[in-house]
Image: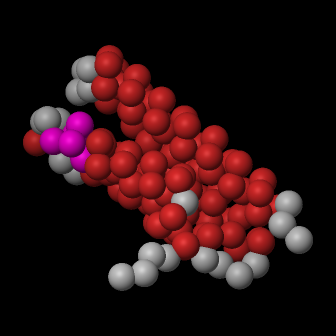
């Protein structure tokens, strides 16, 4: 089976790993949060991978940039929900720091990818 270009990107692979870890971390969240923070942080993390995948396969720089901006925004949403989850004692400090660090790293990778696309001929 061949891989699509996005599957080879380190940033997409890292975002994919983040999704997995977010899903695992949120399994212990209370049922009362199922349609609240749990759903929101999961959706935001999945959207990071989806927008990177769709964006890098677009033809124009403008379209690529727009999708990467959305992926970046989803990463910031994840960070927001991590902060709230920690504030509400749904997420312990170690998990919070780990997931936040991963999210910040991914946001930097998205920005680097966006800059490299703008510098293409």
Quadrant where the C terminus is found in the figure: bottom right
Up the image or down, 54 lies above or below 68; here it is below
Q: Position of residue 74 (x, y in %)?
A: 51, 51
Number of numbered tags placed on the structure image: 0
Left or right, 47 with respect to 24, comes to: right
- Is residue 3 found inside the magenta-colored segment of the image? no
Residue at 45% x, 76% y is 3
Residue at 18% x, 47% y is 34
Residue at 46% x, 60% y is 49
Q: Nearer the viewer, residue 118 or 91?
A: 118
- Is residue 26 found inside the magenta-colored segment of the image? yes
Quadrant where the N terminus is found in the figure: bottom left
Task: Please tell me in which quadrant of the rendered image residue 2 appears.
Answer: bottom left
Chief secondary structure of the magenta portion: helix
Residue at 40% x, 23% y is 97
Q: Position of residue 67 (x, y in %)?
A: 62, 66
Magenta part of the protein: which range? 23-27
Left or right, 6 with respect to 85, comes to: right
Up the image or down, 11 lies above or below 65; here it is above
Q: Nearer the viewer, residue 36 or 98?
A: 98
Q: Is residue 84 visible?
A: no
């Amino acid at each position: 089976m061949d891989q699509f270009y996005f599957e080879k990107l380190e940033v997409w692979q890292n975002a994919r790993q983040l999704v997995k870890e977010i899903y695992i971390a949120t399994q212990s969240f209370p049922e009362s949060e199922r349609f609240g923070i749990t759903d929101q942080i999961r959706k935001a993390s999945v959207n990071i991978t989806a927008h990177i995948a769709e964006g890098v396969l677009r033809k124009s720089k403008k379209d690529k940039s727009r999708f990467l901006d959305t992926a970046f925004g989803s990463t910031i949403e994840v960070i927001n929900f991590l902060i709230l989850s920690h504030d509400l004692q749904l997420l312990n400090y170690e998990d919070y720091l780990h997931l936040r660090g991963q999210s910040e790293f991914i946001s930097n990778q998205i920005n680097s990818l966006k800059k490299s696309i703008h510098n293409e001929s």
